[in-house]
Image (spheres, grey):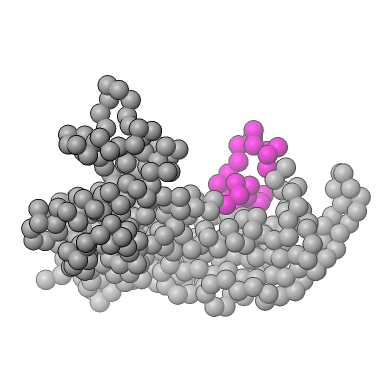
Amino acid sequence: MVKKTLLGKSDSTLMMEDEELITRASSGLALCGIHLGSDDGGRRASKQLLCKPTDCRLIGPGQEFKMETLSFSTIESSRRFCDTVKKSGWSPAFTVSAPLGCPLVGSLSLGWHRNKREEKKNLLDQLSTEACHLQCWYYPKASFNIPRHQMRLSEEAIDDLRRMRTPADAEIFLRNYNSHVSTGRYHVGGVLLKGVTIEAKSAIKLETLLETAATNLNGGVKFGHMGFHAGVKVMNMHEAASSSSKRITNQRATMGMVVIALGPQTTDENEFKTKLEDRSNWYVIDHDEGATLVPVWEIAPFGDFEALQKPRNMLREAWQRSIESEAPTNARLRELLVSSYDTRSTSAQSMPREILPPEGTCA
């Protein structure tokens, strides 16, 4: 029997059960572990950590529609941003590769306070040879979370756990599955990113590069295939004289295209929005930050939990070693690391002194 939710009727486009949609959205991203570390949010697990939940319902969207324009001072930073949106979601992308906080006049972007105007001006006056200007449509359609009591390891994860013999095996497990799972809310829907990249032969003001990219983006550029495509057009670029220089610069630049679609595979924003009515097109587009993170060694597998105590301890110790150098300067990692040591046992004696909680407090 098909489960009915507040998100639609059980017609031909909504026959998929909620739990099946969670399993399929972004190839099961919500069932994969989260990587914590210097490239936090940017590395997706290669194997699925959790099995499909048995009773997990979709609820209404917990976010609002956004249309924003984002600017990047390098093509590589825009590429990292787009890659992280695909792998981990909207919010983590701003951590891994934050766009410039200086939208062009009239853009619906991050916004600047008045006391930032001078900083904005200095940034735009910097010289650069490349830039990227993106327009983004963000459509949240529904949300869900997987409660801790619903979390169970996948059969493949259990098999790998049972085969674990050495610390090296534990490190391989963490590389494949990552280390933690979030109990927070995941958001599903679609994200469409369309943009223009500009590469100049010699350095020119960043403002000129961004204005050139924005002009071409707003001028009805025809977008083709998905992804980043460089060198699709050669153009003349004009830099007007400034108050500090009477020189007018003209030089040739190469324009490229960017199209990323998490959802219906179309470059037309109206068609993209219409096709999102079919929830089989939904992707995981974001997840709430700051939610409780459950370490993999505390997730109950099917079968005998105690029988796997040794490999679970090996996983915990391997993760502790992997982030001990970063924890002292990262409050979130430090908190998770301290809590991973059981202060009621002798394992607390091995806790590095630099991450010990202050006297009189609990780990």
Query: Which quarter of the figure is the C terminus placed in?
Result: top left
Q: Residue at x 17, y 34 (%)?
A: 344
**Could you tell me residue 320's position as x and y percent?**
32, 46
Q: Residue at x 23, y 71 (%)?
A: 16
Query: Quadrant of the rendered structure where residue 282 is?
Result: bottom left
**Could you tell me residue 199's position as x and y percent?**
71, 65
> Looking at the image, can residue 318 be seen?
yes
Task: Look at the picture and state if 7 lies above or below 243.
Answer: below
Q: Nearer the viewer, residue 157 or 294?
A: 157
- Residue at the extreme left: 304
Residue 104 in magenta? Answer: yes
> Looking at the image, can residue 184 be seen?
no
Query: Quadrant of the rendered structure where residue 211 is?
Result: bottom right
Residue 124 in magenta? Answer: no
Q: Nearer the viewer, residue 51 or 355?
A: 355
**In the visual, does 49 lie left or right of 88?**
left
Q: Residue at x 48, y 49 (%)?
A: 95
**Could you tell me residue 149's position as x and y percent?**
15, 51
Task: Look at the picture and state if 121 lies above or below 28.
Answer: above
**In the visual, does 67 lie left or right of 210?**
left
The stretch in magenta equals: 99-120
